[in-house]
Image (tube, rainbow, N blue to C red):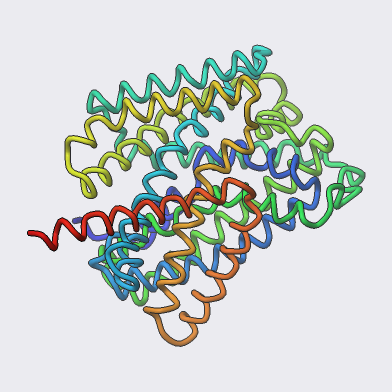
Amino acid sequence: MDELTTPRAVTLYVGALLGPGVLLLPGLAAEVAGPASIVAWGGLLVLSGLLAAVFGALGRTHPGRSGAAGFAGAAFGPRAERAVAVCFLGGAVLGAPVVCLIGASYAARPFGGGPGVTTALAAALLVLVVALTASGGRSSAGVQLGLVGVLVALVAVAVVAAAPHARAGHWTPFVPHGWAAVGAASSVLMLSFVGWEAVSPMTSRLRDPRRQLPRVIAAAFAVTSALYLALAAATVGVLGPGAAGPTPVADLLRVGVGPAGALVAALVAVCLTLAATNAYLTGAAAMTTAVSGPRPARRLPLGVGGVGVVLLLGTGLGWWSTTTLVAIPTVLFLAVYVAATAAGARLLAGPLRVAAAVACVAVSVVLAFAGAVAVLPVLVVAAVASGGRSRAPAAARR
């Protein structure tokens, strides 16, 4: 593998942390907690700093391990590794419909499309990207990073252009739904903070990880923190009661730039949708190959497409909300983080062990606010444990 320079590593870290979710989640958080959603953003940024330190240390001390699942395996054994891998795979696969819904919401907005049009467009985008993935099409790392740069620029322009239209009155009442809603908003927003585990294996590509890694993590954390806080503040301060919508960045651009802003946001969102969903499915196929072999991996795109269309249609028919659709992959990623930080508390030493333990407790609290969908990781663990027990007698007979 090529050696990573510090600027290149920073770019990759920022690319792993930012994604199309940032175009949707500020509106969902404002819907759940109102202006107090800014508290959820701030708390998760502190947690994100802890996660950065923990995953960076685990990647440096266990470079041969494959991310969060490998760290869990090193700490707790092969069953834990498999359970975490399944949770991560499920989160990646079930995140694909969410990304398609984001792109569809932005694409439909300039033309006045309602929920039905948005859902149908999201399903079409998912089918398109599944076909692209099944045919072997892959977006390059350069394309992915280029789109991340476009996303950063889009959000920055939206925030700066709309800032003069902010109103202090939009911040009151600050806690319209009670402080418990801040915890619920945190469980939704956590999807924006998934990514530290994906880049932990990159530490082996740094020339001097001990010197470079703290700089890389600090720079990536500073960039993402500034972007998230600025967008969250602008969403509430500028949009006010209209913040609880599916296209907050397009709404900010409409306020600051005019109707053309929504068209630009729609184009960018669709491009991000295709690239990000393709990356999701390509990564999921690679993990399926590692866990179950190449044959299930070849069938994975069709399964993802079928499940995703059902989830999107259920959202369009009102069987569940967009918040619930977001919560499904988020709770699986939260379970991955609980396991990985618990592994850090066992594998690391000194202040980093304390940081891992604190992060584990914090992520567990966020998971508790996810509601009924928090049972999904429990079912995964039970299924993996049951599968392990069912194979044991057969192995003994042999």
State whether residue 118 is above or below residue 82: above
Rendered location of residue 84, percent (x, y):
37, 57
Name the foreground residue: 92 vs 149: 92
Rendered location of residue 130, percent (x, y):
34, 25
Rendered location of residue 281, percent (x, y):
34, 36
**As drawn, is 382 to the left or to the right of 317?**
left
In the rendered view of the protein, which quadrant contains the N terminus? bottom left
**Residue at coordinates 44% horizontally, 48% vertically from top-left?**
15
Name the foreground residue: 316 vs 156: 316
**Residue at coordinates 61% horizontally, 47% vertically from top-left?**
372
Name the foreground residue: 284 vs 321: 321
Which image quarter: residue 169?
A: top right
**Residue at coordinates 72% horizontally, 26% vertically from top-left?**
254
State whether residue 224 is above or below residue 58: above
Name the foreground residue: 164 vs 389: 389
Residue furthest toward the left?
A: 398
Which image quarter: residue 62?
A: bottom left
Rendered location of residue 290, percent (x, y):
21, 49
**Residue at coordinates 26% horizontally, 54% vertically from top-left?**
390
**As drawn, is 216 to the left or to the right of 235?**
left
Which image quarter: residue 140?
A: top left
State whether residue 84 is above or below residue 52: above
In the rendered view of the protein, which quadrant contains the C terminus? bottom left
> How many badges with numbers are in the image?
0
